[in-house]
Image (spheres, rainbow, N blue to C red):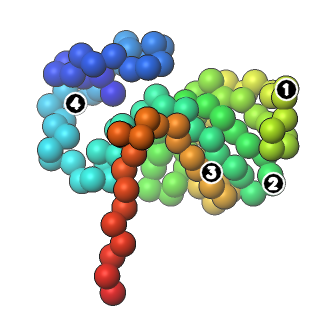
Amino acid sequence: MNDLNNSKPYENHLLNNVITNNANINDENLSAGRRNLRRWLGKPFRVVITDGRVLVGFFNCTDKDSNIVLSMCAEYLEEGEESPRILGNVMIPGKHIVSVSVDLPPEEVYTVKPVKA
């Protein structure tokens, strides 16, 4: 999100006018997972759902139930299909999500370290 303290523009120019409702949020105060979610805002997401459809759009938000909201979303009925159906804004219920991938440059990829039992 662009807030009052962060003027770095997003790759998706439509998101450059977004201002958070709390300009005092500081990345150092957030957990690693939440920092990662903030980096994902406005990035292209690819979500595969249980019926086999593939939804591609820009990540807007998620919640504790793993629901995901995408903007400017397109639906592909089959993997590699040429002509998508344009959906616009969509909310994908977490219970129907099979996999999620995000398009990030290599230097922004967040790696999870395995937890030792």
Rendered residue at 36%/72% (across/down):
114
Residue visible at 38% across and 14% down? 16
Three-letter code, disc 3 = Pro
For the residues labelled 2 and 4, the Cα–Cα distance comes to 38 Å
Q: Decide if residue 14 is on the left or right side of residue 78.
A: left
Where residue 41 appears, as percent x and y from the top left, is 42, 33
Give the label, 4 or 1, closer to the camera.
1
Where, quadrant-wise, is the C terminus in this rendering? Answer: bottom left
Residue ID for mark 3: 93
Which residue is disc 1 drawn over?
83
Labelled pair 3, 4 in contact (Cβ < 8 Å): no
Residue 51 tag number: 2
Q: Secondary structure at mark 3?
A: loop
Tell me if label 4 and label 1 are in contact, CB under 8 Å.
no
Q: Nearer the viewer, residue 115 or 97?
A: 115
- Mark 2 against mark 1, which lies toward the viewer? 1
